[in-house]
Amino acid sequence: MREVTHTRLAVWGDPIAHSKSPQLHAAAYAVLGLDWEYGRRQVTEAAFRDTIASLDDSWRGLSLTMPLKDEAHRIAETHDRHAELTGVANTLLFGDRLAAFNTDVGGIVDALGEHGIHRLDRVRILGGGATAASALVAVADLGVAQAEVRVRRPERAAGLSDLGARLGVDVEVDTLDAPSGDVDLTVATLPSGTALPEEVTTPLAARGGALFDVAYAPWPSALARIWGDAPAISGLGMLLFQAVRQIRVFLHGDPETSLPDEAAVVAAMRAAL
């Protein structure tokens, strides 16, 4: 077997040109003194398994974005708790067994914590996809007992009710314009650039508490512009902190084990955004 002389990582997705992951990881590796190569590659869902199989022993891990998170979860041999709960993975670590992680959940928790949000009782989640599942697990970790999920087509979000039952969270799924109660936090997981009708957004903002919008470009998002006096938090913090947790995985194999001089690493990554 040939000697492996360098360590390779990358972010894969389709599309992928917009990804900020290469500059985030490069900034972190510079502080950590790691001579690791981190690139980006456009990989379709159909080509994912064959492309994984073509990698040599120089590869340490991958960051995954859409539409590869479901397939990454399926091909992995082990899963961390957050990947197991959500059924998706945004991180793969190569080794004796292919290990999957979902660092988006911890990224949401860390981003909210940076804004002083450490405990929640009732939330509203807009959207019903993979990021909504990560958001539901994140707020459950922060103590949420009740969650409203508001989507265009409630039948497509039935899985979130099942997930809520596993988490001990009472989940109510309904349409975006359904009557809603007061909540501590609204988590918007809608695609970047989504603009909802005023008759939908006005009541959501009036009783929505703080806003955490996973979108960050452009910012303020359409929702953030109309949110009023309550705080509106962009998804840039989630992007940053999920990457921090990915680097913990790539270095230690554990998203909960802090990096050496992590404060300096985070500062360098933030400056690279």
Image (tube, rainbow, N blue to C red):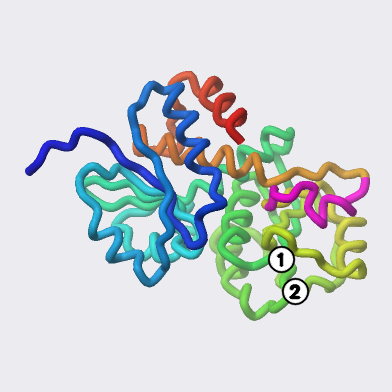
Count of all numbered marks drawn on residues in the image: 2
Q: How many residues crowd mark 2 within 10 Å: few (<14), some (14–19), many (20+)? A: some
Residue 263 as seen in the image, left or right of residue 143: left
User: For residue 115, which numbered disc appears in the image?
Assistant: none
Q: Position of residue 110 (x, y in %)?
A: 61, 38
Front position in the image: 145 or 152: 152
Q: Is the C-beta separation of discs 2 and 1 under 8 Å?
A: yes
Q: Earlier in the sequence, mark 2 or mark 1?
A: 1
Q: Which residue position is annotated with label 1? A: 149
Q: Position of residue 208 (x, y in %)?
A: 84, 55
What is the secondary structure assignment of the residue under circle 2? Answer: strand
What is the secondary structure assignment of the residue under circle 1? Answer: strand
Q: Residue at 39% x, 60% y: name it.
A: 72
Q: Looking at this rendering, what residue extends furthest in the left direction?
A: 1
Q: Which residue position is annotated with label 2? A: 174
Per the image, is 165 magenta?
no
Which residues are the magenta region? 215-228
Per the image, is 220 magenta?
yes
